[in-house]
Image: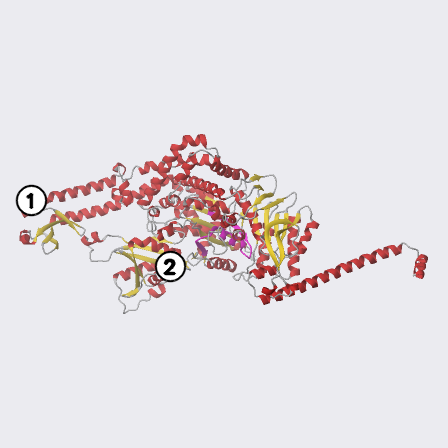
């Protein structure tokens, strides 16, 4: 396996010229680098971590630290206490980082037999963006107690960290249209979430693009050889990321994605648990997955084993299928982008998005859950109303219990990632204590409120979440009671456990240590007799214990077999042979105690992890409560109402609705103009919207979509009254942009998106098409737009908002008067006669348009594009010419229109005359001609 984002330094390192002599540390580095070629290694050297070779140059560049040559390699270093900060920075840049630690302390080494040899070192941890979990990273307990800027930067990073693996089933590859079956597995090792899916994708790889946009993975695993279409898409998706937010790509050998090898890997992995009684059932569940999913899963298992994080895959009941179209509204990647659901389109930040408007969560895990709610609106009215009932109760309940519950969520650390860190046995003692004590305190607080909750809380979602919490968290007190609080807070494992009856090995080792200490303490009496001084006692200097300090004036009285340890001008310090022997034994026992405590600590975590799934469920309840409180807070931002959800028919009725994001951004100083909307499957289901440029058409159609999404999330909405029939999907085609990576023009991109909507939309969908057909000639554009809209009217029957500047499309209202109606964004036109300023001829002056931003029936006669050009500060000479040309084209169009009408009039008159003449007899016709 090798990362594309990390350079392979082995080519330059391992070509060792014969004349170069490497230091022992450099040789140790070279051996480690052979094993971990694609990782940047941080090597512990005393009080700092050092980088060597190309790793040092990369670290110097990315971390802005000094780099210089030392012996044969470039080197750079960082202090040990800032390790997690610098690891985080390198991982964020897309690198794989390995931490190499000393396996022995300097104090023990100094008195050991190998004191002159090199420290033993080995790689203890590997980190990437998706696997950023372990003791070396920022500890949870630091988040709330430090004020460092970078600490706050890391703590605010609570977004999802998906590891996405993609495999292609080339057996089903259609070589004519390049359609292919893809299998994906997405894992969050930091939270324990596992998603899977398989689907057929077109040559444009739209489904894969939608999936990447929705999950926003931080790491992607691919086979070395993938189809050109998939390769181009992944490169495009990863290259548009912000500089400091790189998606890391990991390439694995193709053989790991072959079905035969994948099947063996999976059966071996889950088969090893059969002895525990769970493996057989787990294996049978896994083998039901699609072949392409199994290939991805095998690659993920192999990859996570490198980080010791594969344990999260043991329980298939945690696996969730990604595409659950019977549970959630379909919001594809284009819709998420066009409606700015998760981030704005200006600087790709959260501010200015729907998520930003709704996010008032207090916890990191609550924020992650709210993000899922926003991207997965519900389809079942019972579930939607359950959330709405909870929000309503929070808003209008007079009980103080809900306020007390909300206050409990303040300053709660990220316990979701915390329990997952514990589950992987990668947590520190401090982190364990913080997480478990937090959950224990929550259990105590909620349990005390249970009698009040049973009486005063009525919403089923709140009631269920709150009443189940105490039982799910009940195990925390048992494990917390076994720990010494003071030792836990400083991470001292040797004094961590209170009652050693459950830890006989630690008790035995401590008894042995105490025996040796007593022997050493008793030996001081012998020392006093030898020196004939009752005041002699042991001293500790520079970490060396049990030194006997003697004044240099009487040093001659010291026995010859005593060993001199250190001296000053005044005193000399010695160890007796007895102390040397017993001190060595003591240090060995202390070192063994540390190993025993580490072993018992891991066993302690194993016992605690038996309750992992219950705790995970409890954290899910806490996240749900946080989300509901957040939606209630969002409802206080303006004139919000509770939407009415109906199942009977497809309908969207909005009275005085506002755009939720723009309304918040404008604030109280500038009021957003509300608008009505009514779409129903039995009557008007298509609105054709015209109007001047910048008149508010796009904002209006986005407003309708966002209010619909908010309603099906279970949120109050910015309107006076809203009634929503369940919408199964929202599909949008907006904006104009080409796709260089795919080799597609603006118009091709437009039609590709439209074709995808035609395939996916149903009669219960909301379809939004903004200026379809503008990327080609007028006649072709009108024809395509007309035919497409008519298809949605006749064949699909979806609720449709169609924005256009093509007047011929408005004729569809006559053809389908029941289902189609024309609208425009209203405006006022005042002639601008400032000819002295603009120097226009009187007949070429520009109209001054005042936007009213109000949706109104009928068609707008003009689009007033020159008015926008004037607002954009287009040069006056160009405006003058454009105004003249506009009048000229308008006159020509009017003349052609008049000629067409005259021709039609003449044809009607001639037809009538012929019909009249046929009624006369020939002789009468002759008389008429004679008279004439």
Secondary structure, mark 1, is loop
Q: Earlier in the sequence, mark 1 or mark 2?
A: 2
Q: Quadrant of the N terminus?
A: bottom left
Mark 2 and mark 1 in contact (Cβ < 8 Å)? no
Can you see residue 174?
yes
Q: Which residue occupies 21% across, 41% down? A: 510
In the picture of the structure, the residue carrying the numbered disc 1 is: 534
Q: Who is closer to the viewer here, 275 or 290?
A: 290
The circle on residue 800 is none
The residue most toward the front is 836
In the picture of the structure, the residue carrying the numbered disc 2 is: 38
Label 1, residues with CA under 10 Å away: few <14, some 14-19, many ≥20: few
Whether residue 221 appears in magenta in the rendering, the answer is: yes
Residue 212 falls left or right of residue 584: right
Q: Which segment is the magenta one?
A: 195-222
Residue 104 falls left or right of residue 213: left
Q: Quadrant of the C terminus?
A: bottom right
Residue 366 place in picture, x, y as percent:
43, 44
């Amino acid at each position: 396996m090798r990362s594309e984002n990390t350079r392979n330094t082995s080519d330059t390192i391992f070509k060792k010229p014969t004349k170069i002599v490497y230091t022992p540390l450099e040789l140790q580095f070279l051996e480690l680098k052979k094993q971990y070629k694609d990782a940047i290694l941080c090597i512990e050297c005393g009080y700092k971590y050092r980088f060597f070779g190309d790793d040092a140059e990369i670290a110097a560049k990315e971390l802005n630290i000094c780099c210089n040559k030392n012996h044969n390699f470039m080197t750079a270093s960082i202090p040990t206490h800032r390790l997690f900060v610098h690891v985080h920075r390198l991982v964020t840049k897309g690198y794989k980082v390995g931490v190499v630690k000393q396996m022995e302390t300097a104090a023990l080494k100094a008195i050991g037999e190998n004191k002159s040899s090199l420290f033993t070192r080995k790689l203890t941890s590997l980190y990437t963006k998706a696997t950023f979990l372990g003791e070396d990273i920022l500890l949870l307990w630091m988040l709330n107690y430090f004020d460092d800027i970078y600490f706050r930067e890391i703590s605010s990073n609570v977004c999802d960290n998906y590891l996405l693996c993609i495999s292609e089933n080339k057996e089903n590859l259609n070589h004519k249209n390049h359609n292919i079956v893809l299998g994906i597995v997405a894992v969050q090792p930091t939270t324990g979430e596992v998603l899977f899916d398989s689907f057929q994708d077109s040559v444009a790889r739209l489904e894969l693009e939608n999936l990447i946009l929705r999950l926003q993975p931080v790491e992607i695993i691919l086979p070395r050889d993938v189809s050109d279409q998939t390769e181009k898409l992944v490169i495009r998706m990863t290259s548009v990321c912000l500089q400091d937010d790189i998606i890391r790509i990991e390439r694995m050998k193709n053989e790991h994605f072959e079905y035969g090898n994948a099947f063996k890997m999976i059966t071996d992995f889950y088969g090893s648990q059969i002895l525990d009684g769970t493996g057989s059932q787990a294996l049978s569940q896994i083998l039901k997955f699609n072949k392409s999913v199994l290939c991805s899963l095998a690659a993920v298992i192999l990859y996570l084993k490198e980080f010791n994080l594969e344990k999260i895959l043991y329980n298939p009941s945690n696996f969730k299928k990604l595409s659950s179209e019977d549970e959630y509204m379909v919001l594809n990647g284009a819709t998420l982008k066009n409606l700015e659901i998760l981030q704005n389109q200006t600087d790709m930040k959260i501010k200015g998005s729907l998520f930003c408007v709704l996010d008032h969560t207090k916890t990191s895990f609550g924020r992650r859950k709210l993000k899922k709610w926003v991207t997965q609106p519900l389809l079942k009215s019972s579930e939607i109303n359950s959330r709405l009932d909870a929000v309503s109760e929070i808003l209008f309940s007079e009980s103080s219990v809900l306020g007390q519950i909300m206050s409990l969520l303040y300053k709660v650390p990220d316990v979701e990632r915390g329990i997952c860190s514990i589950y992987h046995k990668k947590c520190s003692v401090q982190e364990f204590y913080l997480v478990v004590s937090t959950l224990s305190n929550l259990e105590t607080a909620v349990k005390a409120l249970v009698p009040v909750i049973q009486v005063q809380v009525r919403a089923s979602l709140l009631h269920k979440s709150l009443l189940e919490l105490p039982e799910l968290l009940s195990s925390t007190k048992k494990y917390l009671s076994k720990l010494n609080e003071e030792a836990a807070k400083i991470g001292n494992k040797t004094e961590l456990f209170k009652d050693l009856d459950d830890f006989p090995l630690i008790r035995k080792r401590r008894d042995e240590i105490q025996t040796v200490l007593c022997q050493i303490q008793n030996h001081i009496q012998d020392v006093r007799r030898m020196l004939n001084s009752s005041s002699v006692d042991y001293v500790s200097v520079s970490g060396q214990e049990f030194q006997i300090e003697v004044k240099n004036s009487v040093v001659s009285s010291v026995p010859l077999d005593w060993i001199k340890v250190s001296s000053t001008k005044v005193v000399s310090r010695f160890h007796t042979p007895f102390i040397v022997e017993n001190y060595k034994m003591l240090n060995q026992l202390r070192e063994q105690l540390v190993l025993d405590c580490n072993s018992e600590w891991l066993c302690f975590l194993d016992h605690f992890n038996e309750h992992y799934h219950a705790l995970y469920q409890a954290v899910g309840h806490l996240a749900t409560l946080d989300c509901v409180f957040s939606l209630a807070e969002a409802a206080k931002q303006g004139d919000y109402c509770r939407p009415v959800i109906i199942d009977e028919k497809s309908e969207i009725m909005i009275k005085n609705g506002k755009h939720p994001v723009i309304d918040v951004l404008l604030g109280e100083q500038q009021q957003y103009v509300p608008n009505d909307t009514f779409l129903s499957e039995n009557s008007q289901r298509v609105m054709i919207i015209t109007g001047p440029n910048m008149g508010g058409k796009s904002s209006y159609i986005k407003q309708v979509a966002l209010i619909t999404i908010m309603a099906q999330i279970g949120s109050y909405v910015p309107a006076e009254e809203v009634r929503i029939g369940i919408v199964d999907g929202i599909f949008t085609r907006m904006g104009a942009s080409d796709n260089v990576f795919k080799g597609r023009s603006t118009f091709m991109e437009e039609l590709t998106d439209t074709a995808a909507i035609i395939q996916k939309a149903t009669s219960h969908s909301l379809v939004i098409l903004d200026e379809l057909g503008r990327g080609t000639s007028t006649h072709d554009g009108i024809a395509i737009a007309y035919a497409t809209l008519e298809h949605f009217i006749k064949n699909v029957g979806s609720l449709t908002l169609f924005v256009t500047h093509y007047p011929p499309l408005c004729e569809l209202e006559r053809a389908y008067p029941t289902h189609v109606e024309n609208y425009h964004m209203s405006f006022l036109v005042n002639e601008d006669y400032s000819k002295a300023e603009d120097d226009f001829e009187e007949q070429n002056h520009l109209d001054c348009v005042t936007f009213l931003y109000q949706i109104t029936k009928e068609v707008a006669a003009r689009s007033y594009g020159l008015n926008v050009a004037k607002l954009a500060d287009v040069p006056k000479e160009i405006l003058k010419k454009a105004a003249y040309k506009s009048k000229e084209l308008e006159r020509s169009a009017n003349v052609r229109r008049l000629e067409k009408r005259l021709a039609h009039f003449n044809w009607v008159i001639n037809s009538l005359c012929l019909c009249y003449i046929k009624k006369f007899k020939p002789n009468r016709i002759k008389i008429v001609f004679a008279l004439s």
